[in-house]
Image (cartoon, rainbow, N blue to C red):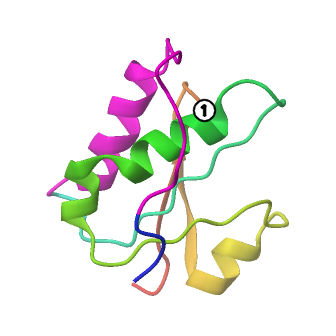
């Protein structure tokens, strides 16, 4: 279910590999048994959408999950309420980890 792949041309994209690896590790962490939602925020032109597309299209990620969603510009707090999740931690790199709050 969901969009098979998001079309884009990343042949000229540089500098996102470290961030991409961090996000991928969080998504496929075998120790994480909770739902995983990773949001991106910041000024326009930083590469947030490009990073998200690269992760979304990554074969390792595609094999790990059976359902995918691409959500754009949710008002603050909506995802947390809709999915029953709460903020777990915010890393220094700005990646926020959310965990299931129904425990």
**For mark 1, does the 10 Å Cα neighbourhood hold few (<14), some (14 to 19), or many (20 or more) residues?**
few
Residue projecting furthest to the left: 30
69 lies left or right of 55: right
Q: Quadrant of the N terminus?
A: bottom left
- Is residue 90 visible in the rendered image? The answer is no
- Is residue 51 visible in the rendered image? The answer is yes
Q: Quadrant of the C terminus?
A: bottom left
The residue closer to the viewer here, 77 or 68, is 68
The number of discs equals: 1
The residue closer to the viewer here, 20 or 102, is 20
Identify the residue shown where x is 46% and y is 77%: 2
Residue 62 appears at what percent x and percent y?
27, 60
Residue 34 appears at what percent x and percent y?
33, 71
Identify the residue shown where x is 14% and y is 57%: 30
94 lies left or right of 99: right
Compared with 1, 16 (above or below) is above
The residue closer to the viewer here, 84 or 8, is 8
Secondary element type, mark 1: loop
Compared with 7, 92 (above or below) is above
**Residue numbers of the magenta segment:** 5-30
62 lies left or right of 88: left
| Residue denoted by label 1 | 94
Identify the residue shown where x is 20% and y is 63%: 64
Residue 40 appears at what percent x and percent y?
65, 44
Q: Quadrant of residue 44?
A: top right
Residue 27 appears at what percent x and percent y?
32, 53
Q: Is residue 73 magenta?
A: no
Q: Is residue 28 magenta?
A: yes
């Amino acid at each position: 279910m969901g969009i098979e792949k998001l079309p884009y041309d990343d042949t000229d994209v540089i500098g996102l590999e470290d961030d991409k690896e961090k996000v991928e590790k969080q998504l496929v962490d075998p120790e994480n048994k909770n739902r995983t939602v990773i949001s991106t925020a910041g000024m326009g032109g930083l590469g947030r959408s490009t990073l998200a597309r690269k992760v979304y299209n990554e074969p390792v990620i595609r094999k790990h999950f059976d359902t995918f969603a691409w959500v754009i510009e949710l008002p603050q707090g909506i995802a947390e309420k809709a999915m029953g999740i709460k903020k777990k931690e915010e890393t220094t790199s700005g990646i926020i980890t959310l965990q299931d709050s129904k425990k």
